[in-house]
Image (cartoon, rainbow, N blue to C red):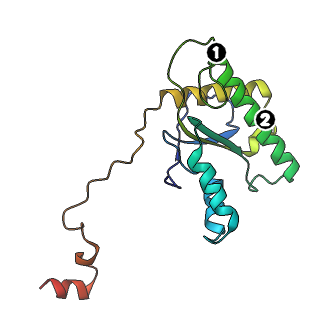
Amino acid sequence: MEPTALMPLKVTGISTPRAFSITYRNAPVYAMTARAWIDSNSMSNPIRAYFEKRWAERKEPLWWCAVTFKTVRSPKTIRSSMNRRMRFAFIESLRKRGYAKDGNRLPGAEPGPPLTGTVQFLGLETLLTTKMDDLVAQMDRALQGIIDNKRPSPRSPKPQKPGKQHWGKVAWGRAASEEAK
């Protein structure tokens, strides 16, 4: 799994101030919070193997989380409440579209493929004053963006400019240019 593969998802049609930003990838990848945990814990940490095994065995088609960082200058209890509101709004949007919170279709919903990928919602300062109805409407638009997004899972390699394929042979200053002669 690529730990830094989540990319910002452009969501259109939100007229009120955005309450959250969203990153998405149409593949299972580590969220930013998991990446921070992986980077801060050594390979010899006894819990690390347990978490890596849990991530490897996940079968849900849609991985998602809601996080509010300390950049929103509020106490932890307020940030937790913001996360809870985002989770509630996203689950409500999923339910309205016929999806369970794991991305599978609900029983009785119209048939279709499950939602796949990894989504991370990042709470913004405006979430503090956003009404729940507006938040659910924003989540509806975000969910529509996830459904419409057909971003390929593997990154396609960018074509490189001629002469820059090999790091050792690129002319990096005087020594490299003398070596080329």
Q: State the residue at coordinates (59%, 21%).
A: 105
For marks 1 and 2, give the CA distance.
25 Å
Say which element carries label 2.
Answer: helix
Q: Position of residue 19 (x, y in %)?
A: 71, 38
Image position of 11 with respect to 34: above or below: above
Image position of 22 with respect to 131: above or below: below
Say which element carries label 1.
Answer: loop
* Residue in front for this viewpoint, 63 or 140: 63
* Residue in front for this viewpoint, 21 or 151: 151
Q: How many marks?
A: 2
Q: State the residue at coordinates (69%, 62%).
A: 47
**Mark 1, other Cα within 10 Å: few <14 / some 14–19 / many ≥20:** few
The amino acid sitting under disc 1 is Pro
**Mark 2, other Cα within 10 Å: few <14 / some 14–19 / many ≥20:** many
Q: Is residue 142 left or right of residue 136?
A: left
Q: Which residue is mark 2?
A: 85
* Residue in front for this viewpoint, 53 or 162: 53
- Residue 31 visible to an observer of this rendering: no
- Give the mark, 1 or 2, whose residue is nearer the N terminus: 2
Q: Position of residue 109 (x, y in %)?
A: 61, 13
The amino acid sitting under disc 2 is Arg
- Residue 136 visible to an observer of this rendering: yes
Q: Position of residue 27 (x, y in %)?
A: 49, 41
Q: State the residue at coordinates (69%, 67%).
A: 46
Furthest residue to the left? Answer: 181
* Residue in front for this viewpoint, 29 or 87: 29
Q: Position of residue 77 (x, y in %)?
A: 88, 48
User: Mark 1 or mark 2, which is nearer to you?
Assistant: 1
Image position of 49 with respect to 10: above or below: below
Residue 107: assigned label: 1
Image position of 117 with respect to 41: above or below: above
